[in-house]
Every structure is written in structure tokens, then in C-alpha cells.
Image (tube, rainbow, N blue to C red):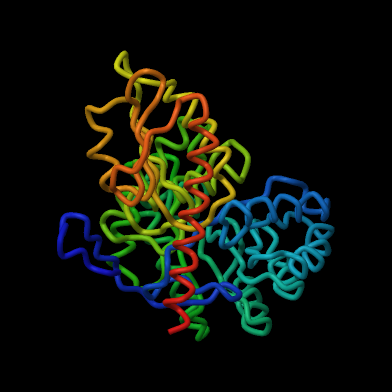
Amino acid sequence: MSLNHIRPWRNIYRRESRQIMVGNVPVGGGAPITVQTMTNTLTTDVAGTLAQIEAATEAGADIVRVSVPDEDSARAMKEICANSPVPIVADIHFHYKRGIEAAEAGAACLRINPGNIGSEARVKEVIRAARDNNCSIRIGVNAGSLEKHLLDKYGEPTPDAMVESGLDHIKILQDNDFHEFKISCKASDVFMAAAAYQKLAEATDAPIHLGITEAGGLTSGTIKSAIGLGNLLWMGIGDTIRVSLSADPVEEIKVGYEILKSLGLRHRGVNIISCPSCARQGFDVIKTVEILEDRLSHIKTPMSLSIIGCVVNGPGEALMTDVGFTGGGNGAGMVYLAGKQSHKQSNADMIEHIVEQVEKKAEELAAAEAAEAAE
């Protein structure tokens, strides 16, 4: 992390962790926090699954998880893994043989659940397959499927029970000299998940996968995830994240990136700063932002755009953004470039003009970054 000496209150000190590889993507050890999602197509529908993976990748997914519930799905994984633009994590529950088959089919990582994968002997077979096929493992603890002996011990799912489950499984992997693993301890209860993750972060140096499981629909799930994941990330905990929404996987990626962008942990695409609008607005802010979010979704270069309805906060916000538009009067507003007042623009043509200015600035920033990298 680059320290911000001018604004030290923005600094986040990330927890130190080991680094593993999920295919060609580094996780942990100071690597950028990766954003994941999971397909919801039938895995046996190879074309449909690949189409969903490609859409998620276009939205910014670094890694995509695919469920492997049966033998037909395991067979389909070979084609899926071979044609996926990003590493694939095979989601394994109950049937340890599916994990072995998925590793042999080219999965970059196996997600196994200590609560339902079976005996230690079966886990050892999965470990062997992972090692033989250069595959990492995610230990995926879930409050809703803890081992019976832990539920008997604690009486109900608790942060301590979740962490004990995860550490028990870590021991199995380490006893078998397998160290290419990351771990998660998810719960739908934000308090339980946050408490478990904090305890886990102190107990292991393994990379941590963050998630609030079964978070809900697009609106409610986004809020729960932003609160739970946002607080943990702010504390420096987390090396890879998945926002679990009852929504299109692309929405999970969008929300994940927005959470990271709000904390300055990842930067991708246009960060739009806009006002909620009021009677002072010189144009329809809400509709304008809705259109611009869609029109600028193709831009991947990190940059900022302020869209403010009036001159109360508009000039001040524009000072901090690459491109800005502040509502004025008489059907026109002011365009700001690189924080400086540039020229007036009519409201009637503002959207096309703003898109043009943003695209031009994105090209300039990308060219400058490429030139710097070539030096």
C-alpha cells in the first residue's frame, strides 16, 4: 500500500499474509485484493456458463467460482477451465471425488467445506489431487454447515466455532505439507462473520477470502456486504472478496469493486461523485448520473467524474476530480478539467459532451501510465 502522507486518515494498513496463486492470479502477500463471483448457470451448460464467466470478466472479475455438484458437471469443467479468461474455482460440497475430478479438469482452486466434505482420509485424497495438478485450495467455513461436534460443543454457530473449524482444517492441510490455501469463515449474520474474521486474522497468516454469505437481494445484500466487508477491509483484513447477492453475478462484481474503490483499495473505471439533487439543481442529476453510469461502463482506466447539480458544492468537488460538471443557470453549467474551470456547456448537450471529455481524459491517463511503465 502506498502511504498517503498528506491525508494520513486515508491509510489502511493491510494485514500481512502469505501469498498463494489461483492460476495466474496472486492472492495475499500484498497483492491487489481480488474480486470474485460465482456462476448460477447449470455447469453442464458449458456455453451458458462460459458466457456468464465472460460477462463477469468484462465487469472486472479476477476469479470466478463454478459449482461442481455431480459427475456431468465435473466433465464439463474441462472445457470451461480451458476456455475461461480467468482462473476457475471449483465449488465442492459433499462429494470429495468431484474435487479430485475438478482438479484433474484444470480448476485453479478447489473450494471445500469442512462441514460436509467428509473424513480426513477423503480430504487427503483431495489434497493429493490439488498438489498433482498445481491447484490451490480454499477452506470455506460456513456458519450454516458447521461440523456436528462443534455444534454440540458450542450449542450453536458462533465465531469461535467457525474459527475452530477453519483451524482444524488448516492443520490437516499443513500436516500433509500443503500450504497453497486460503480460508474464509462466512455467515449471513454480519456480526458473527465480522467477529469470526477478526479472530481468524489473528490465528493464521493464510490469505483470507471475505464474504457475507446469503446476503440477500441487490439492495439489501449490497448494504449488508458493504457494512460487513467494508469494516473488515478498513481494518486491513481481506485478500480476496465475493459479494453474495441474489442477483446477476455481474452485479456482485460491480458492488465488490465499489466497496474497494470507496476505501481506495482498488481502482477501476470511472468513479462518479454526484449529489442527491434538490430544488437548487440546474439539471436532472439523478437521470444524468443513471445515463452516464451506463454510457461510461466500458472505461476501465481509473478516473473520477463529479456531477453536481448546483454551485454550492460543485466547484469544490470539481477541484478533486479529473472531469466535473456543475449546474448553473439559464440552461447551462460549467465544465471542469483536471480540477480547473474550463468552459460552459449547455444542459441539452451535456451528456454527449461529458462522455467525450471523460473518454478523452481516460485515453490521456492510460497513455501516461503506459509511458511511465515503459521507462
Q: Is residue 91 left or right of residue 78?
A: left
In this orientation, which residue lies closer to the viewer: 145 or 21? 21
Q: Nearer the viewer, residue 91 or 362?
A: 362
Where residue 208 sits, quadrant-wise, is: bottom left
Instruction: Please name the residue shown 16% across and 57% down the image.
Output: 7
Name the residue rendered at 47%, 31% in the picture.
289
In the image, is 28 to the left or to the right of 120?
Answer: left
Camera sees residue 7: yes
Pick the residue in front: 270 or 1.
270
Residue 190 visible (yes or no): no
Residue drawn where x is 51% and y is 78% of the image: 180
Label count reads: 0
Q: Quadrant of the N terminus?
A: bottom left
Most foreground residue, 41 or 269: 269
User: Which quarter of the image is occupied by the C terminus?
Assistant: bottom left
Which residue sits at x=83%, y=64%? 75
Query: x, y (%) of residue 170?
Result: 45, 72
Spot occupied by residue 56 in the image (x, y as percentages of width and height) = 63, 52
The picture places residue 13, in percent across and down from the top left corner, at: 24, 65
Q: Quadrant of residue 62?
A: bottom right
- The outermost residue toward the top is 279
User: Is 368 positioned to the left or the right of 339 in the image?
Assistant: right
Q: Indicate the position of residue 118 as horizontal and vertical percent values.
A: 61, 63
Residue 225, quarter of the rendered image = top left
